[in-house]
Image (spheres, rainbow, N blue to C red):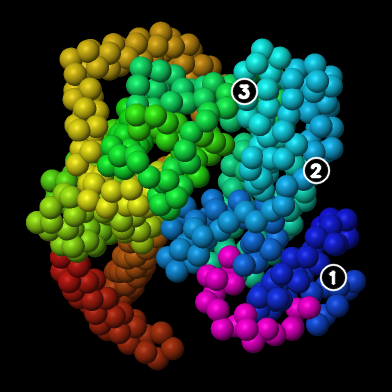
């Protein structure tokens, strides 16, 4: 660990400065990072009165923006995890922006040459030296292929992968230290959370992965004339270069901000909403970041979706669960909602279902007899998920990502058409999904799958029995018994053994007394031991013990 710290000393200094500048340097000291002797101790202690006037959420956002791409991405993903962070911090994380300058065209040229294995001139007629857009991980240039086709070329920032891996190492160390010192970090498994975020960000670094996502969503909308997905040039795409069809359209962001007019915003809003629920409830694979900057408007209000680095995946079972939750929400069926919530995640064994239902009932009072057009679906889902988190129900990361997607979608739709009801558009998709679930063809397919599963079970049964026979024959069988009330059982067995021992002692004492009585009778003399009337005393003790034993038996109620 010390070697890592020394290797990344400058980066540690950047982090400490950012925390101190925003009034949170003391946190790093509590984590034990103050033993980095080459960093001045004052950096941990310096106070910034201006920073302390800001909220904790604002300070965290400023720190992440100052530390660059990895931390910004970390914060953006963290904004989907309402099970980990309070709402006031989530709201600040959602404001995270990438304020990064573009890198030089010389670097762009060098990366293209390295990735393509030859000079860019062999593949492109020209490449605009000024980027169309610059982000934390890469930037986009307009170019023309030898065929004359206009394309958008996304190029990854130089050495960004190594920088991000360095930050991951530091984050993992900070999470490890936090788990040793902070109860909250242990409860929410800080190291696992960092690993989960790292996995998501690494996936975004691989442009081949983004190309696959783009092609998959293009197939989903191949028959949909209202949605367009740009095609990917697979021959020129690598892990660090993505070449796609260039789409000349109006940025939705310009439309929502009033910079462009003359388009039917209501129609655009409806098509965007339908496209989202088509992906979520029908296809189970969705664009997880539908903000205005990732959407273009084409003629006839056709929409084009861009940037598929972040996507969500729902299995068939997860789609059914979310669709059922959606219908139960519309029908105000709180009992069904509780059942589905328990199916959607991993619930603790000791969960209080009564308390869970009471919380859902309390939440639904807010939407009682409220018109569908007035319901915020994103808020309703978010609040339901918060109830789940309150009761320690661990939801899949894809469900939390879905909640974030719906929140982003609703914000975009509100800017286009505030009167549009997302719930009313979503309902038909939910019902279609349920109809497909109970369609005879689906039922028959499920039955066939069950028969196939049973056939595999019976096929493997002789082999399993043979193995079991071998284990028993070799005296290797192991039996494990789990008793939920083992302590209580042991306590009762202990009492029984004590009572049995007492009875045996009483019996032995009685036999001795009988022996003394018989001996006295045969000798014709009284029994005196140490000048004491042993028979009389023994008789009194035996009678007392007998009476106490009978009393104990009757008192236990088990006579």
- Percent from the top left, x then y, of residue 234? 64, 18
> Element under label 3?
strand
| Extent of the magenta region | 43-61
Residue 150: image tag:
3
- Percent from the top left, x then y, of residue 131? 69, 40
Q: CA distance from mark 3 to mark 1?
A: 52 Å
- Percent from the top left, x then y, of residue 54? 55, 79
In depth, the one of 66 and 444 nearer the eye is 66
Q: Quadrant of the N terminus?
A: bottom right
- Percent from the top left, x then y, of residue 201? 62, 43
Res. 323 image quadrant: top left
Sequence-wise, the earlier of marks 3 and 2 is: 2
Q: CA distance from mark 1 to mark 2?
A: 35 Å
Label 1: how many residues lie within 10 Å, few (<14), some (14-19) or many (20+)?
some
In depth, the one of 403 and 538 nearer the eye is 403
Q: Residue at image x 38%, y 45%?
A: 261
Q: Is residue 57 magenta?
A: yes
Closer mark to the observer between disc 3 and disc 2: 3
Res. 499 image quadrant: bottom left
Q: Which residue is mark 1?
A: 36
Q: Quadrant of the C terminus?
A: bottom left
Q: Which residue is mark 2?
A: 104
Sequence-wise, the earlier of marks 1 and 2 is: 1
């Amino acid at each position: 660990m010390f070697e890592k710290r020394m290797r990344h000393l400058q980066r540690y200094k950047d982090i400490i400065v950012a925390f101190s500048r925003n009034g949170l340097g003391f946190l790093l000291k509590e984590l034990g990072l103050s033993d980095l002797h080459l960093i001045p101790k004052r950096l941990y202690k310096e106070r910034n009165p201006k920073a302390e006037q800001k909220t904790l959420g604002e300070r965290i956002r400023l720190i992440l923006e100052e530390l660059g791409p990895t931390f910004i991405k970390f914060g953006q993903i963290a904004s989907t995890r309402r099970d980990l962070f309070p709402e006031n911090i989530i709201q600040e994380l959602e404001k995270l922006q990438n304020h990064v300058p573009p890198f030089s065209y010389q670097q762009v040229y060098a990366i293209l040459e390295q990735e393509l294995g030859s000079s860019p001139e062999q593949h492109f007629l020209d490449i605009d030296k000024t980027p169309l857009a610059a982000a934390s991980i890469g930037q986009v240039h307009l170019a023309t292929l030898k065929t004359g086709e206009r394309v958008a070329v996304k190029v990854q920032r130089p050495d960004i992968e190594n920088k991000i891996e360095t930050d991951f190492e530091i984050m993992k160390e900070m999470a490890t230290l936090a788990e040793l010192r902070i109860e909250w970090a242990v409860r929410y498994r800080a190291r696992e959370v960092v690993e989960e975020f790292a996995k998501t960000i690494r996936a975004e670094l691989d442009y081949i992965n983004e190309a696959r996502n783009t092609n998959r969503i293009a197939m989903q909308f191949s028959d949909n004339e209202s949605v367009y997905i740009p095609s990917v040039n697979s021959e020129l795409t690598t892990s660090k270069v993505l070449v796609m069809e260039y789409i000349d359209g109006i940025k939705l962001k310009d439309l929502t901000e009033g910079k462009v007019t003359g388009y039917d915003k209501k129609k655009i809003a409806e098509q965007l909403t339908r496209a989202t629920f088509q992906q979520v409830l029908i296809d189970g694979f969705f664009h997880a970041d539908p903000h205005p900057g990732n959407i273009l408007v084409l003629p006839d209000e056709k929409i084009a979706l861009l940037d598929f680095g972040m996507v969500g995946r729902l299995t068939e079972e997860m789609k059914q669960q979310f669709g059922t939750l959606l219908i139960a929400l519309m029908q105000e069926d709180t009992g069904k909602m509780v059942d589905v919530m328990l199916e959607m995640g991993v619930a603790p064994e000791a969960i209080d279902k009564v308390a869970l239902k009471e919380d859902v009932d309390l939440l639904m009072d807010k939407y009682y007899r409220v018109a569908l057009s007035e319901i915020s679906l994103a808020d309703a889902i978010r609040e339901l998920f918060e109830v789940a988190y309150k009761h320690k129900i661990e939801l899949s990361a894809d469900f939390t990502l879905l909640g974030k997607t719906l929140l982003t979608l609703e914000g975009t739709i509100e800017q286009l058409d505030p009167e549009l009801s997302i719930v009313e558009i979503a309902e038909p998709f939910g019902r279609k999904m349920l109809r497909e679930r109970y369609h005879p063809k689906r039922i028959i397919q499920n039955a066939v799958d069950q028969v196939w599963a049973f056939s595999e079970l019976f096929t493997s049964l002789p082999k399993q029995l043979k193995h079991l026979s071998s284990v028993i024959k070799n005296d290797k069988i192991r039996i494990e018994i789990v008793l939920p009330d083992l302590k209580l059982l042991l306590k009762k067995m202990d009492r029984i053994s004590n009572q049995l021992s007492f009875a045996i002692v009483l019996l032995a004492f009685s036999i001795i007394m009988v022996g003394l009585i018989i001996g006295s009778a045969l000798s014709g003399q009284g029994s005196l031991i140490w000048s004491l009337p042993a028979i009389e005393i023994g008789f009194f003790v035996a009678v007392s013990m007998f009476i106490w034993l009978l009393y104990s038996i009757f008192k236990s109620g088990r006579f």
